Image (tube, helix red, strand yellow):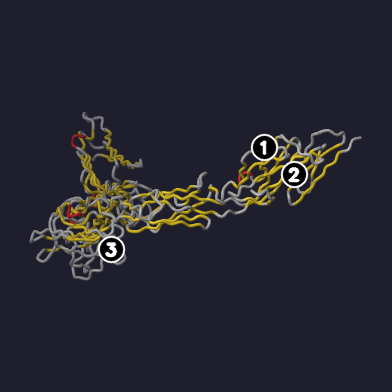
């Protein structure tokens, strides 16, 4: 029976793996190692594996650029060198951290084979494992990867390394580069941070390439877009090594003016009670599009509808403003007494570069009480016994000269009962300013089923412009009015505010008469100014579905009656859209002519404003005992019928 054995020798000089077995000869074999175990088949040869420096001294850690090698001594178990044998090398642990100059090498006459080994980059640290295989024999070795001291070359700006060699135009750019070395070798993978006392470097952090070079691009523009000027220091920093260089940036030059904004873009004539001032902004830019600090900008009024003030109310004199760090100038515009478009010119460089304002307008004014209207598409809805029956409310609003108010004007609503949309926003359609809201039947329902609905908005009172300057001033006649309120007791003989009714208070205390009806106003709350809450009120009725006939009168030629709904507190008209059909029944056979309802005579329905509907049914050729049946059908198809006998 043959025996096999393994021999392992470990010293400071490396790892020796040898193998031989009974039977002699160059028997093949393999060795694998773990922390605790080495196993081998038949062995005859041995590998000594080590890491050495340039002097051939065994080391246990490598660093970038230090010229380290992986060395293999291949020999027989008797120590006889084995030449001309292929040795394979591989990194079996943390392979990405290590670079080998080759993966194979041939043993020389001394049985030695080696390859160069280096960290993947100068920034690499840690540990790795290398394996070498010759024939059937393998060996592994763990080693460390040490941090490497990096040096940077002089920082070149625009290809120059001297500070006096480069001057940039305002907002200009220049290259920035440096080379990293470690142990006198070009160092790749080194992180280099670029920065400057003014301006931007892109990218700001760079990894050196295979030649050890890190490059960036310097721009003489700050992050806020403004330009640098004067001396600027640029630096490159890597692993404790720093290089700096300086350049000179020329002072920026203003080259453009842009209109920025007018807020708000619409103001109103003096005396309108609405906004009469706007803040206008222009921005000055340098040649690179950045904000320009310290530019003197001349501003003049180039389009004035009448009385507009520049900087000061009523002044049309040109003014000068100086830009701040954001490149902006700001000034106030005051409206005059005449509506129309406004235009301002902002210029630099003796007027050769300029911009004009856009979309700034003086409008006539906000909604006028005289030109504020409210209407419903249905004033009697079948809502006494039904939820969700709706009516559409339409508001139209104009200023005191009958021109449409601006789109976006908000109109508010409040209702005594049911539910109403809280507001609507004015839009312009074919030049007409209007908006719509919805009323829907639901609780609460007043006993009389009449719902007061108030629409209101910020606006102005009426006045007589006696001096014809289109503004309210001394000598003009104001139609003063008190606070707006919702007149829930709309049928009261005395039209006045009752405690508890909804009110929009403006804090006025001047003596004045109150009013109810379509424009309710609280007495003794006048202000003496044109600003007010414009208002309009309508009354909708939630009519019932059952018809009641009363005040009936009959003759052979006509039947008249009053038609209302059935409601305990108050009889109201039937819902809008209710139909009435009258049918004649001829019961007199001796009468040669048949009794008919005469359509040509018409059926008249009126009196709705009084809370009732009077109906007349015209008859033709009717005699006593003939009958007429009247059927009343509501929009929700509720039907009430009554038959009349002709006297």
Q: Can residue 362 be seen in this view?
A: no
Which percent across, then down, holds residue 619? 21, 37
Assign the C terminus to one quadrant of the image: top left
- Rate crowding at label 2 as few (under 14), some (14 to 19) or many (20 or more) other CA atoms within 10 Å: many
Q: Kindly state the secondary structure of the residue where label 3 is placed.
A: strand
Image quadrant where one finds the N terminus: top right
**Could you say which quadrant of the image residue 460 lies in?**
bottom left
Distance (Cα) linking label 1 and label 2: 15 Å
Q: Nearer the viewer, residue 517 or 602?
A: 517
Q: Earlier in the sequence, mark 3 or mark 1?
A: 1
The residue under the point 83% across, 42% down is: 6
Query: Which mark is drawn over residue 105?
Result: 1
The numbered disc on residue 35 is: none
Q: Going from the N terminus, do you reach mark 1 or mark 2 first?
A: 2
Identify the residue position indicated by label 2 in the image. 48
Q: Earlier in the sequence, mark 2 or mark 3?
A: 2
Residue ranking furthest to the right: 1
SS of the residue under disc 2: strand
In the foreground, 612 or 437: 437
The answer to whether residue 315 is above or below residue 538 is below
Tell me the distance, in whole angstroms, between the alpha carbons under discs 2 and 3.
101 Å
Depth order, front residue of 117/217: 117
x and y, in percent, of residue 489 in the image: 27, 61
- Residue at the spot of label 3: 504
- Is there a contact, CB below 8 Å, between mark 2 and mark 3? no
Residue that sits furthest to the top in the current view:
592
């Amino acid at each position: 029976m043959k025996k096999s054995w393994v021999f392992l020798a470990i010293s400071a000089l490396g790892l020796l793996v040898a193998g031989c077995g009974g039977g002699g000869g160059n028997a093949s074999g393999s060795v694998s190692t773990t922390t605790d175990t080495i196993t081998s088949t038949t062995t005859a040869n041995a590998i000594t594996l080590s890491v050495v420096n340039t002097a051939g001294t065994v080391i246990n850690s490598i660093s970038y650029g230090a010229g380290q090698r992986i060395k293999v001594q291949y020999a027989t178990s008797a120590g006889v060198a084995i030449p001309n044998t292929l040795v394979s090398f591989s990194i079996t642990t943390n392979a990405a951290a290590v670079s080998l100059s080759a993966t194979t090498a041939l043993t020389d006459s001394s049985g030695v084979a080696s390859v160069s080994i280096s960290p993947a980059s100068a920034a690499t640290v840690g540990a790795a494992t290398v394996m070498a295989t010759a024939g059937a024999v393998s060996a592994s070795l763990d080693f460390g990867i040490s941090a490497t001291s990096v040096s940077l070359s002089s920082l070149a700006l625009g290809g120059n390394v001297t500070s006096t060699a480069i001057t940039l135009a305002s907002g200009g750019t220049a290259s920035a580069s440096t080379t990293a070395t470690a142990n006198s070798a070009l160092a790749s993978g080194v992180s280099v941070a670029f920065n400057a006392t003014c301006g931007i470097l892109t990218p700001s952090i760079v990894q050196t390439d295979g030649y050890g070079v890190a490059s960036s691009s310097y721009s003489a523009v700050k992050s806020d877009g403004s330009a640098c000027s004067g001396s600027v220091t640029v630096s490159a920093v890597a692993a404790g090594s720093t290089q700096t260089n300086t350049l000179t940036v020329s002072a920026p030059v203003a080259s453009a003016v842009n209109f920025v904004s007018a807020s708000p873009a619409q103001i109103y004539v003096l005396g309108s009670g609405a906004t009469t001032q706007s803040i206008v902004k222009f921005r000055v830019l340098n040649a690179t599009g950045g904000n320009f600090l310290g530019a003197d900008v001349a501003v003049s009024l180039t389009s004035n509808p009448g009385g507009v003030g520049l900087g000061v109310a009523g002044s049309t004199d040109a003014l000068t403003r100086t830009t701040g760090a954001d490149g902006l100038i700001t000034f106030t515009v005051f409206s005059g007494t005449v509506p129309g478009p406004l235009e301002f010119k902002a210029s630099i460089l003796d007027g050769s570069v300029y911009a004009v304002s856009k979309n700034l307008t003086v409008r006539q004014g906000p909604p006028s009480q005289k030109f504020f209207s409210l209407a419903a598409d249905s004033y009697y809805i079948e809502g006494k016994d039904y939820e969700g029956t709706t009516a559409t409310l339409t508001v139209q609003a104009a200023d005191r000269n009958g021109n449409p108010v601006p789109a976006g004007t908000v109109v508010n609503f409040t209702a005594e009962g049911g539910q109403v949309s809280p507001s609507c926003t004015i839009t312009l359609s074919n030049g007409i300013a209007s908006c719509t809201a919805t009323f829907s039947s639901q609780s609460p329902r007043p006993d009389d089923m009449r719902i007061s609905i108030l629409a209101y908005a910020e606006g102005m009172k009426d006045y007589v412009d006696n001096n014809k300057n289109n503004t309210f001033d001394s000598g003009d006649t104001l139609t003063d009015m008190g606070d707006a309120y919702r007149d829930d007791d709309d049928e009261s003989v005395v039209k006045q505010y009752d405690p508890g009714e909804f009110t929009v208070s403006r804090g006025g205390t001047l003596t004045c008469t109150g009013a109810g009806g379509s424009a309710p106003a609280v007495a003794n709350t006048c202000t003496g100014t044109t600003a007010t809450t414009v208002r309009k009120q309508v009354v909708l009725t939630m009519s019932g579905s059952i018809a009641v006939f009363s005040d009936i009168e009959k003759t052979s030629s006509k039947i008249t009656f009053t038609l209302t709904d059935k409601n305990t507190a108050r009889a109201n008209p039937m819902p809008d859209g209710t139909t009435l059909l009258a049918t004649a029944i001829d019961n007199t056979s001796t009468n040669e002519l048949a009794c008919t309802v005469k359509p040509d005579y018409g059926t008249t329905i009126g009196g709705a404003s009084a809370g009732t509907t009077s109906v007349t049914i015209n008859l033709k050729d009717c005699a006593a005992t003939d009958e007429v049946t009247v059927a009343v059908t509501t929009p929700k198809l509720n039907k009430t019928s009554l038959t009349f006998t002709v006297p």
